[in-house]
Amino acid sequence: MCRSRGDLSVGNGEHADDLSSGARLHFPKIDQPHTFVFISDIHYGSSQDPALVRKALEEVEELGPEFIVLGGDITYEFTTMEEMLEIYRMFGEMDIPVYYVYGNHDRQPNADMIGGASYSPQELEQAIAGCGIRILKDEWVYAAPDVVLVAREDISVEGRIELTALPERPEDAYIIWIDHSPYQDDEIASSGADLQLSGHSHAGQLFPLRTVYRLGVRCIWEDYLVGTTRVYVSSGFGGWYIPFRTEKTCNYEVITIMPGQQK
C-alpha cells in the first residue's frame, strides 16, 4: 500500500523525488544539527501491512535519529488490544527516545459503531507509558538542549486547554509544535513556534477529497506558512480502513534542523 520511507524537503517548499533526502531547515536558535523522525496515522491493524511497518521501524532505527515523534492515530477503532500492544512494544524496543501525541482515533471514541472498544483509554495510556514512550498532552519538554517540543491534546477532546493556559516555555530554544490536527490556523499563528508538525488528513487519501479541500483554500498535505510558523502536514504512514490511496503515498518524515539563518 505504501512506501516505507518518506521525504520532506520543506526547506525549499518542494517534495523531492529522492525518498532518502529528508529536510534541511536552517534556524539561528540552534547550535548544532538535529535529525529526528515524525510518524503519524499508522492506524495499526487497518489496511497497512504490518510487515511494512516493521520494515520502516528497522529503517528508522538504522538511521539513528535523536528522537522520534508519534503524531497521533497510531491506532484506531479497528485496532485490537493485541495489535495496540504490539505496535507500542515495537517502538518501545527501539533504543531511541520516543514522544507521543494523541490523535482523534487512538482512544477509539467511535468504537460503539463497530461493536465496542477493544481497550479503554486507561489501558492505552498504560501500554504506551509501559513501553517507555513519553506521552505529551498540553505540555512541553526538551528534546535536546536547544530544542523544545510543545504538544497539544487533540482538538476533538473536551478539556483541551486554551493556548494562553499552556505552561510557559523557553523562548530561546527551537520550538516544534506538535498537534495532530493542522486546521487551527489562529492558534498556529499565535503559537510563536518555529515549526508545526501535523498529520490527520492522509493527504485526502481518496480522490476527490484533496481537491475539495483545496477548493476550500485548505492545505491538507504540504509545507506552508501560517504567520511566521512553518507548518508541515504529513500524509501519514497508513490510511483509514480502505486498503488503497489515489492521493499521496504513505511516508514517515525524516527532518534535520540546522544552525544558521532561517531558509
Image (spheres, rainbow, N blue to C red):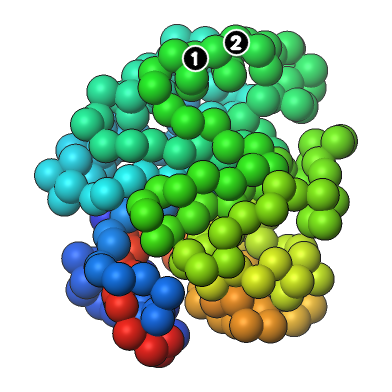
* Crowd band around label 1 with a 10 angstrom C-alpha radius: few (<14), some (14–19), many (20+): some
Q: Is residue 206 visible?
A: no
Q: In the rendered image, which quarter is residue 98 located in?
A: top left
Which secondary structure, mark 2? helix
Q: Nearer the viewer, residue 54 or 89?
A: 89
Q: Is residue 192 left or right of residue 16?
A: right
Check disc 2 and give the amino acid type: Glu
C-beta proximity under 8 Å, tags 1 and 2: yes
Q: Position of residue 96 (x, y in %)?
A: 26, 37
x 65%, y 71%: residue: 192
Q: Is residue 109 above or below residue 245?
A: above
Q: Position of residue 87 (x, y in %)?
A: 39, 24
* Crowd band around label 2 with a 10 angstrom C-alpha radius: few (<14), some (14–19), many (20+): some
Checking the image for residue 123, the label placed there is 2
Check disc 1 and give the amino acid type: Ala
x 40%, y 81%: residue: 28
Checking the image for residue 127, the label placed there is 1
Checking the image for residue 106, the label placed there is none
Disc 1/disc 2 C-alpha distance (Å)? 6 Å
